[in-house]
């Protein structure tokens, strides 16, 4: 049975049970803890509080100083356009890449990160980078990477990959049982016992 999330919960119980982000935020508000940020950040804050009784302030990222005045919304773009520190994914940029790469072009997080790390390169350099990222994500051996805070999504993906004959309803039945247990919230073939 899953314990109540309150300040008396043991660190072990807190870390071995699945908590919705909304439950974590509600706990933070009751205990006057910071509740902004992603689920992983909030879990770190609660872990620190349960260990020490003290409030851990989340790291505040300083705003990056932008030196470039290049307007990615309206400036004409070419293969020789230099990627600046003010780079933005805009409709103007999307149109450029649709023209250069084709209708299968779309932005993704990995490609957006590439831009942040490659100021000074050109849009010409971005095209093979996008193709490489696209191939890694969509190639024959591509494996979907789901961020660690999305435990349910990872469970669904792994469950259905292992059981192509099952449906989402089956996944949900198993997940509801699994999240009550004191074990990692990852799919195991043994979870089929819940059906």
Image (cartoon, rainbow, N blue to C red):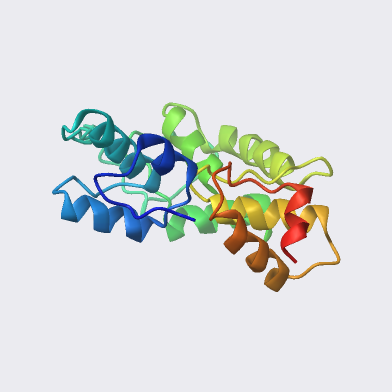
Q: Which corner quadrant of the image does residue 7 belong to?
A: top left
- Give x and y (percent) for residue 79: 55, 40
Residue nearest the observer in this picture, 68 or 19: 19
- Give x and y (percent) for residue 140: 84, 44
Identify the residue at horizontal 32%, vertical 44% (top origin): 9
Residue 191 vertical placement versus 148 (above, below): below
Residue nearest the observer in this picture, 54 or 75: 54
Identify the residue at horizontal 54%, vertical 53% (top origin): 96
Spot the residue most to the bottom: 169
Number of numbered labels in the structure image? 0
- Give x and y (percent) for residue 19: 42, 53
Can residue 152 be seen by looking at this rendering? yes
The C terminus: image quadrant: bottom right
Residue nearest the observer in this picture, 112 or 30: 30
Can residue 107 be seen by looking at this rendering? no
Identify the residue at horizontal 27%, vertical 38% (top origin): 45
**82 left or right of 5?**
right
Residue 72 vertical placement versus 22 (above, below): above
**98 left or right of 35?**
right
Residue nearest the observer in this picture, 136 or 116: 136
């Amino acid at each position: 049975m899953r314990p109540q999330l309150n300040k008396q919960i043991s660190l072990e119980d807190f870390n071995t049970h699945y908590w919705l982000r909304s439950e974590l935020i509600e706990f933070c508000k009751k205990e006057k803890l910071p509740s902004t940020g992603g689920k992983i950040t909030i879990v770190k804050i609660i872990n620190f509080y349960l260990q020490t009784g003290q409030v851990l302030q989340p790291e505040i990222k300083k705003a990056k100083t932008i030196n470039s005045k290049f307007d990615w919304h309206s400036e004409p773009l070419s293969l020789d356009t230099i990627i600046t520190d003010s780079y933005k994914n805009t409709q103007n940029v999307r149109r450029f890449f649709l023209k250069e790469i084709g209708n299968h072009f779309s932005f993704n997080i990995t490609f957006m990160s590439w831009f942040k790390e490659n100021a000074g390169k050109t849009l010409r350099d971005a095209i093979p980078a996008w193709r490489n990222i696209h191939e890694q994500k969509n190639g024959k051996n591509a494996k979907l990477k789901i961020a660690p805070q999305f435990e349910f999504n990872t469970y669904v993906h792994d469950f259905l990959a292992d059981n192509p004959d099952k449906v989402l309803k089956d996944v949900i039945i198993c997940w509801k049982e699994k999240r009550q247990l004191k074990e990692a919230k990852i799919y195991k073939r043994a979870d089929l016992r819940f059906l």
